[in-house]
Amino acid sequence: MISFDLRAFFGCVFVFFAIPVLCFFAGMPVQAQVSSHSVSEAPADTAGMLRAVLGEVYIEASRMPVIWERQPVQVSLLRQGAADASAASSLGDVLRFGSPVMIRRYGLGGIQSVSARGFGARQTSLMWNGFGINHAMLGETDYNLIPAGFASNIRVATGNSSAGFGEGSTAGSVLFDSPAPANRTSFSAQTGAWGQRNFGFQTGFRGPVFRASLHLSGAQAVNNYPYFDDIRQREEFRRNNQFQNRHALLSAGFSRGRWQYDGSLWLGAAEHHISGSSAVRNPRAVQTDGFTRWTNLLALQQSRGLWQLSSFHEWYRLDYLDAPSRIESLSDLGRHQLRLVYRREAAAGLFLSAGADAGQTTINTNNYSGTETRRHLSVFAQAEYRPVEPLTFYPVLRLLSWSDFGEALTGSFGANWRTPLRGLHLRAQLARNFNPPGLNDLYWSPGGNPELKPEESTSLEGGLAYTRELGGFRTRAGLTLYRIWFENGIRWLPGPGGIWSPVNLFEIDSRGAEADLSASLHWQGWVFTMDGALARTRATSPRQESVDGELRRIDRQLTYVPEWSWKAGLGLSKFGLFANASLQQVGSRFTTADHSAPNDPLGAFADLSLQLGYGHQFRAADVRLAWTLHNLTDGQHQFISRYPLPPRYHTLSLRIGFRY
């Protein structure tokens, strides 16, 4: 049964409102006001950095406010409306068509896991309001548990290093923020095949001093869709595949003089029946998730500097029950993190940032021999140095300490050059990354290995960014070449007595290219949009094999990593009528490390969706009605072997909003 932790909820609500009220009356009236949230756009000149913070600028954990084209790494900004154009109900659905990362789908309603540059979700940081929310036990988070309506300002930074965020960014970061409060109220509903039902409600207020918003979201489905079983050579139906999710997000803040506060309180509850592989005849497993997440940001603007004090608190209960297999896993997680950052313009052409980050994670579960606690502390320093106007350097250094396995030093050095060709920038970065073992890796009983070392990697990338605006035509394009050398990768292997245990032995050599393009054209009432992303990934695990008595290096593509993939989206609207098309092309994938399975490789497939609809504004009101046809070609798709995706189906959505 789904439930919230009421004590945590009421405690959070009290502190949530008490802190901003106390800070408000402590505020002193000055001219400037500070903004919040995370990386987006700011002026290109270094001298204007702090002045930019006074406007609508986004600040990312320890990173500087830098516009997209002047970043040292690839950052993909998802276009506003991307979720509507694909009828996305979760963050995973949004990223599936609108970003360079791959979303590994375990069937409709099943787990959605991210994969970037050949690495999995454990090596990709998922950041909400600047804080990582990958589950501390598992090292990853199901993207199906994040409502699309709760995610704004979505960015995918595949080149982000762990020096910028502290850990887990070997393959980069996926970042999103709480929606900013606005003077608007809206209702939305969606219905579709196999019992799909989604609803949403948003309301908000934004005044000169105070602002607040409330978002509610709910989703459920039976998902007993048909598929062709290639083992039994007949049509079957997915069983035990139903789910229901409920979420509430409350955001509030104020701006007064030099002070600004923003906070978000997110409560979520989900019950997912897990159908598992199609080879399982009578699945019965059920997983329930219940969590409370809370972020705070208090900022103080001074004449030449900016102070930011932010915190993150999380209470997460995860229960898994598979009665036929006699497996029951119960866990309670508590995570608290505090961050202090100071930024200032030290001199013309030199902007400095430094800070400290401390946190504690506690796990109480029947899978460990007792309650386990991890504490961490990190200090960092970062600079943006512009010796001449077109050239900028970005050095970052971070020292980390973990209570359960020691210290690590990580850093990165990036550069960006604005070429004489208008709108064209060249960029490059060298980084050293660390990813700590998950708590399950260290403490699972039996089999956990407390002697594990952090996963380590060195990454090198370079590329270009191009932006241009000509009248009603706007375009943004990027190209990146990269290589990542990954070592001490954690892999679970069988040991004595059949007990599996993790060891540091996995190595990966990942190299490839990423390209993305976004364009829009406004002409005589017509609006045309286009988005595209292309990725070529060669990710192999070096192995030594004996061939004719000699040891030879054999490089094989990693499992479920397509060498080629590309995505495209097209949109056209006029007189309120609109049409959108979303396409994802996934290359062939291997299911085993040695490529020896009978069904290797899984065939390439294309996933195409078409949307038609009407949207119109009636003074202060607006309405949007859309019909979406998914899997237009009715293909028999499966990203993961034995986890069939649904055949062609449709959804119908309606949203009504009011501005005031």
Image (tube, rainbow, N blue to C red):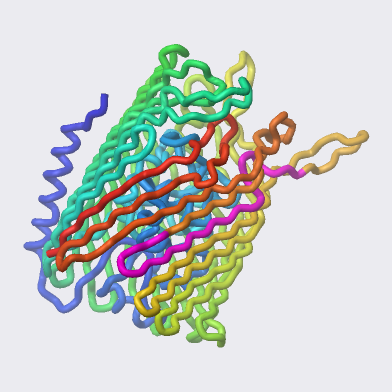
Q: Is residue 20 left or right of residue 65?
A: left
Residue 210 shows up from this direction: yes
Residue at the spot x=74%, y=31% of the render?
596
Residue 205 image offset from top left, x and y in percent: 13, 60
Provide the major secondary structure of the magenta segment: strand
Where is residue 157 drawn, in percent x and y?
48, 59
Who's the residue at 58% across and 26% down the image? 229
In the displayed structure, would residue 127 be above or below residue 493?
below
Q: Position of residue 295 (x, y in %)?
A: 26, 50
Q: To which quarter of the image does residue 30 belong?
A: bottom left
Q: Is residue 44 above or below residue 616?
A: below
Query: Image quadrant for the C terminus?
Result: bottom left
For the residue pair 147 and 6, the one nearer the viewer reads as 147
430 to 86, vertically: above or below:
below
Is residue 406 visible in the rendered structure shown here? no
Q: Residue at x 50, y 45 (%)?
A: 631
Query: In the rendered structure, does residue 560 fall within the stretch colored magenta?
Result: yes
Q: Which residues are magenta?
A: 555-579
Quarter that holds the N terminus: top left
Q: Give whichever of 598, 23 is nearer the camera.
A: 598
Q: Quadrant of residue 536?
A: bottom right
Query: Farthest right residue?
Result: 548
Relative depth, front residue between 409 and 653: 653
In the displayed structure, does residue 388 sit left or right of residue 83?
right
Q: Residue at x 24, y 49 (%)?
A: 188
Residue 432 in the image, given as x and y percentages of width and height: 56, 56
Residue 13 in magenta?
no
Tally of marks: 0
